RNA sequence: GCGAGGAUGGCGGAACUGGCAGACGCGCUGGAUUUAGGAUCCAGUGGAGCAAUCCGUGGGGGUUCGAGUCCCCCUCCUCGCACCA
């Protein structure tokens, strides 16, 4: 500590001589970054008596392109909060790590013949350098890397817990196969029939895959959203994705066949209006149901549907298509024979893959009935079902024992009746599917799974973890759905440590989401070989108090992580049921042309160049000053001049042109005190509200006043000002604290200054006086002036009096400290 | 189509429970200083008008002494979801 201080003194002198009291951001920033690093200035303490604050960024995927200006947006926001909370007496955990498994590294390896481990290491080093150059106050001793065997050992351990609880299973399922990427993708990774990464076409194909039973947690994932301090739209997205709907499953007998068609409906009340049925083309009973006469037509239709990509099936097709199966079913309520159709507007993946069609009260069924001339029957009064489906409430009609009931009552009554008759049950369905968890790629966590000759599966014992990813020469996906790992014979073939049998390892790998599902837990206890996280540390630090990241993870990372967290809660590893108490999505930064930044548009801003030219402090300040954190906003390099200029003015306030301290012992004037304490009060509140742009504006206003009161700054305000500035511009604040004030200790853990409330209220206030709502004059009156006196003061104003004399005062509104308004009727 | 968010000077954006619209910054204009400046400082800057004044928060209506803010209708933009039975 003392050595560092002495060294710094020498460096400062050198710098001062060469730059003659100029704001030399490069020298200042390098000096403080080095000191923070060597002193481990931001290490979180495992002192459980202190109040804690865990503030987390969504950790980045370390791409070869390096940091883009979007990363530091949220990272600066969390850094300001972290630095502020330390000053408020919190023990702050503010870590950073790397989400480093995944496709891009592997893709790059394929193209350039460089091992993903190597490019990953290189990219991480570049990212770390760039982040450190921005002065973020991370506790670097807690850095984690999802590709580190010491880390993914625990990812595999969690998989074992899932497996043992029956939450991980293998299934032959129709999957999203992406030929271009040579792998399967989760539903969440497919957008409009294309891969989320790369935008390649995705087709349906049955394959044996590892699945995670996230559906078993659907209800908890849904209901626990209510208590989270998350943006409402994001919670809605998750609710929407989970898509829970309540209704009934109803069995329809098929006329002339010994099968029942089970349907799911949210409108059991409309059963009397079911005039036909529809099955999905891939429905497993299709072969039984379709008559010989209709078989050629149905087979052709099914084949055609199979050829369509998801994109075509959901996006492009708006005309309803379908074909009659030749068979009829019996409506259990009416006893009528109703035709069974096959149509691709019914999906195998939702409900039971078959529906009862109620064209009178469902828009899709209505459209289909119209197209194929099927009967439409009204069973809920209130609309004109010949014209359009009526989906609203109303009394039931044409519905036997339901007649006269309103829709909700009719639903309940019908379910009761179905259950009595043994023809149906109340049921809940979710849109959420089980999570397809395996990938046919090299660069991911291996499964701790062994395949035996008899086809059975066993797990690698915990003591044998991690199952290390072998080094390979080739990473090409085989294209057949085999993972590249399948080619590594001496890795695949191994001995089961439990039975001693020769077994074959699972060759699929886990998806990128696996590592990011639980990294926030490892930050708490990153070097523990005994536990994923030590229980007492977990109890202290969890949950994450503030989590900031991009909205693109609304239903991917954030849903998966919540799922794993709940499983770990059930396993007893974590003490809370939800990992992220408060969540914020930062907005996107667009290019200077107002378009999304992209290499092809050539509008990408390189943070390194900006930092070089304006400095990390000006860069941090600018990113926060651009606008609200959550807003999408365009980059303007010119804007850096504003924040850089502000820092120069701050510097000049503390250091004169000769490079000597401009801090003086004079008493601060009232204006300075009022400006400072007003600012301090606002900045503190703004940080709590994550309103950083207005906090910076307030500091700019404050500095404008202090500069007018200058030259130099009174000692009484100098240090408090720097403490207030430090979360935003830590390098300059530390530098001025050390040089202009001669301090030796860092501002990192110092206390936030007390606001002196006396300076928040001024003796006089300006009160506008309106006549008929238009401001005519502004009065300077004592702040505590009463209503009557204020009105008198307004009437005494010469200009006001003249105007009042021109008419009759019909009404006077006087709000002390705010406004006076005379309503005047002309005579 | 459904859901959510948004529209304020030349630009990014301020405005707590309705109370001086345009804080702060960029840009621009003029000036000072400088060999020079993409440096610094001072002044100005919503629009129209010499002025008093008038007009101004996407458009139209309403509530109110008073509306960027509240209510109704419409237009446009962004982001989700998209045959979910």
Image (spheres, rainbow, N blue to C red):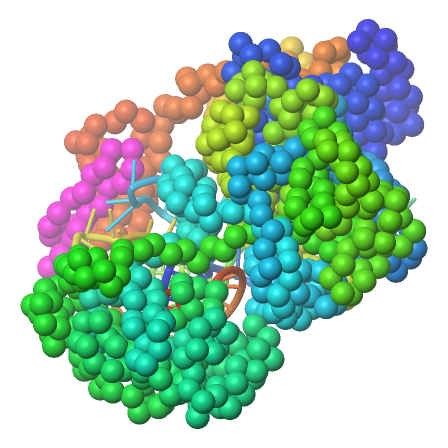
Q: Is residue A823 magenta?
A: yes
The image shows residue A476 at horizontal and vertical percentages of: 84, 59
Name the quarter where the N terminus of chain A is drawn.
Answer: top right
Viewer-nearest residue: A623 or A158: A158
The image shows residue A478 at horizontal and vertical percentages of: 81, 62
Q: Which residues are magenta?
A: A804-827
Q: Residue at x 78, y 65 (%)?
A: A479
From what the image shows, is residue A195 above or below residue A495? below
Residue B17 as seen in the image, left or right of residue A668:
left
The image shows residue A735 at horizontal and vertical percentages of: 75, 22
Q: Is residue A596 magenta?
A: no
Residue A277 visible in the current orientation: no
The image shows residue A178 at horizontal and vertical percentages of: 69, 66
Q: Residue at x 59, y 75 (%)?
A: A309
Q: In this view, which residue lies farthest toward the left?
A: A404
Q: In this view, which residue lies farthest toward the top?
A: A2
Q: Name the quadrant containing residue A812.
A: top left
From what the image shows, is residue A278 above or below residue B16? below
Name the quarter where the C terminus of chain A is drawn.
Answer: bottom left
Q: Residue at x 21, y 28 (%)?
A: A786
Which SS type dominates the magenta stretch?
Answer: strand
């Amino acid at each position: 500590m003392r050595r560092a201080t002495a060294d710094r003194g020498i460096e400062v002198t050198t710098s001062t001589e060469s730059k003659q009291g100029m704001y030399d951001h490069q020298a200042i920033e390098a000096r403080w970054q080095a000191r923070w690093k060597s002193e481990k200035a931001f290490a979180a303490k495992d002192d459980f008596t202190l109040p804690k604050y865990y503030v987390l960024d969504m950790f980045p995927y370390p791409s070869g392109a390096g940091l883009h200006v979007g990363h530091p947006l949220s990272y600066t926001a969390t850094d300001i909060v972290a630095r502020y909370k330390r000053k408020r007496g919190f023990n702050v955990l503010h870590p950073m790590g790397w989400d480093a498994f995944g496709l891009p590294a592997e893709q790059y390896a394929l193209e350039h013949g460089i091992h993903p481990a190597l490019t990953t290491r290189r990219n991480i080093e570049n990212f770390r350098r760039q982040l450190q150059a921005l002065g973020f106050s991370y506790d670097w001793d807690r850095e984690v890397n999802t590709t580190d065997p010491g880390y993914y050992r625990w990812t595999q351990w969690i998989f074992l817990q899932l497996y043992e609880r029956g939450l991980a299973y293998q299934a032959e399922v129709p999957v999203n196969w992406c030929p271009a990427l040579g792998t399967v993708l989760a539903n969440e990774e497919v957008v409009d029939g294309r891969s989320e990464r790369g935008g390649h076409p995705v087709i349906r194909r049955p394959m044996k895959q590892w699945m995670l039973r996230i559906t078993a947690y659907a209800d908890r994932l849904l209901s626990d959203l209510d208590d989270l301090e998350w943006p409402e739209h994001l919670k809605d997205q998750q609710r929407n994705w989970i898509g829970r709907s309540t209704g009934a499953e109803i069995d329809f007998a098929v006329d002339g066949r010994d099968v029942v068609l089970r349907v799911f409906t949210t409108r059991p009340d409309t059963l009397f209006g079911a005039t036909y049925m529809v099955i999905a083309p891939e429905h497993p009973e299709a072969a039984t149901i379709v008559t010989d006469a209709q078989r050629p037509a149905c087979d052709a239709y099914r084949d055609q549907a199979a050829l369509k990509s998801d994109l075509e099936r959901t996006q492009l097709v708006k005309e309803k298509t379908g074909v009659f199966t030749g068979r009829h079913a019996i409506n259990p309520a009416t006893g009528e024979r109703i035709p069974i159709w096959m149509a691709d507007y019914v999906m195998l993946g939702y409900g039971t893959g078959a529906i009862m069609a109620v064209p009178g009260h469902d828009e899709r069924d209505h459209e289909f009935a119209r197209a194929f001339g099927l009967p439409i029957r009204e069973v809920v009064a209130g609309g004109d079902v010949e014209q359009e489906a009526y989906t609203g409430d109303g009394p039931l009609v044409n519905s036997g024992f339901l007649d006269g009931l309103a829709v909700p009552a009719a639903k309940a009554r019908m379910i009761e009746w179905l259950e009595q008759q043994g023809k149906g049950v109340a049921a809940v369905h979710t849109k959420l599917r089980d999570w397809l968890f395996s990938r046919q790629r090299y660069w991911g966590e291996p499964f701790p799974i062994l395949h035996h000759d008899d086809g059975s599966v066993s797990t690698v014992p915990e003591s044998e973890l991690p199952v290390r990813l072998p080094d390979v020469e080739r990473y090409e996906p085989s294209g057949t759905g085999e993972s590249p790992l399948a080619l590594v014979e001496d890795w695949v073939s191994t001995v089961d440590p439990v039975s001693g049998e020769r077994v074959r390892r699972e060759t699929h790998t886990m998806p990128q989401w696996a590592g990011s599902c639980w990294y926030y837990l490892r930050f708490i206890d990153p070097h523990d070989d005994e536990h994923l996280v030590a229980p007492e540390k977990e109890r202290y630090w969890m949950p994450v108090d503030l989590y900031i990241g991009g909205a693109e993870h609304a239903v991917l990372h954030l849903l998966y992580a919540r799922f794993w967290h709940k499983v770990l809660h059930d396993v007893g590893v974590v003490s809370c049921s939800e990992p992220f108490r408060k969540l914020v999505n930062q907005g996107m930064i667009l290019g200077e042309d107002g378009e999304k930044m992209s290499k092809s548009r050539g509008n990408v801003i390189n943070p390194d160049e900006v930092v070089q030219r304006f400095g990390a402090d000006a860069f941090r300040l600018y990113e926060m000053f651009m606008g609200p954190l959550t807003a999408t906003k365009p980059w303007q390099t010119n804007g850096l001049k504003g924040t850089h200029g502000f820092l120069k003015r701050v510097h000049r306030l503390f250091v004169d042109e000769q490079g000597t301290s401009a801090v003086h012992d004079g008493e601060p004037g009232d204006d300075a005190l009022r400006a400072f304490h007003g600012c301090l009060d606002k900045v503190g509140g703004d940080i709590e509200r994550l309103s950083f742009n207005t906090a910076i504006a307030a500091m700019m206003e404050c500095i404008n006043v202090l500069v007018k009161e200058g030259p130099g700054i009174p000692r009484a305000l100098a240090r408090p000002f720097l403490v207030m500035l430090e979360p935003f511009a830590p390098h300059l604040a530390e530098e001025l604290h050390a040089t202009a004030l001669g301090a030796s200790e860092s501002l990192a853990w110092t206390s936030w200054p007390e606001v002196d409330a006396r300076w928040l209220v001024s003796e006089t206030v300006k009160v506008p006086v309106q006549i008929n709502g238009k401001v005519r004059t502004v009065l300077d009156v004592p702040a505590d002036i009463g209503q009557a006196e204020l009105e008198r003061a307004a009437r005494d104003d010469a200009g006001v009096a003249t105007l009042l004399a021109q008419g009759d005062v019909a009404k006077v509104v006087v709000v002390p400290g705010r406004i006076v308004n005379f309503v005047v009727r002309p005579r």
